[in-house]
């Protein structure tokens, strides 16, 4: 269920950003490109915790 909500909010926020940024520079809204960017952002968001280490860093000191 958390993946659904992560995708939902990622999709919504990327579409909003696509619309606002496009209107600021005067280009028409393109749903398809926003959807592709949202899917790529979702994959990065889901894969990032898998790549980052979970253990605290060991201190090497005297």
Image (cartoon, rainbow, N blue to C red):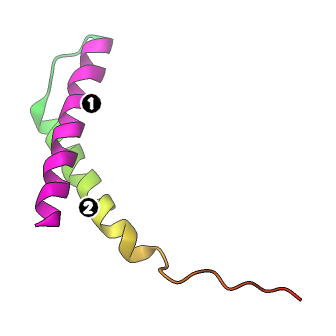
Identify the residue at image location x=26%, y=21%: 20
Front-most of residues 52 and 33 = 52
Q: Quadrant of residue 30?
A: top left
Q: In this view, does 59 lie to the left or right of 44?
A: right
Per the image, the residue denoted by label 2 is 43
Q: Is mark 2 on a helix, strand or loop?
A: helix
| On-image quarter of the N terminus | bottom left
Q: In which quarter of the image is residue 33?
A: top left
Identify the residue at image location x=14%, y=56%: 5
Q: How far apart are marks 2 and 1 (CA)?
A: 18 Å
Query: Which numbered marker is on residue 17?
Result: 1
Q: Is mark 1 on a helix, strand or loop?
A: helix
59 relative to 7, above or below: below
Q: Is residue 7 magenta?
A: yes
Q: Residue farthest to the right?
A: 62
Q: Quadrant of residue 56?
A: bottom right
Q: Give the range drawn in magenta.
A: 1-24
Q: Which of marks 2 and 1 is nearer the N terminus?
A: 1
Q: Where does the image place residue 53, in percent across and percent down from the top left? A: 49, 79
Identify the residue at image location x=89%, y=89%: 62
Q: Residue farthest to the top?
A: 26
Q: Where does the image place residue 40, in percent across and percent down from the top left? A: 25, 53
43 relative to 11, above or below: below
Please tell me how many numbered marks the rendered image carries.
2
Q: In this view, does 40 lie to the left or right of 60?
A: left
Q: Magenta: predominant secondary structure element?
A: helix
Front-most of residues 40 and 54 = 54
Identify the residue at image location x=16%, y=65%: 2
Q: Is residue 23 magenta?
A: yes
């Amino acid at each position: 269920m958390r993946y659904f909500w992560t995708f939902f909010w990622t999709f919504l926020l990327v579409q909003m950003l696509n619309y606002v940024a496009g209107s600021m520079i005067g280009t028409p809204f393109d749903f398809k490109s926003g959807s592709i960017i949202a899917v790529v952002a979702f994959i990065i968001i889901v894969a990032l915790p898998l790549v980052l280490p979970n253990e605290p860093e060991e201190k090497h000191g005297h």
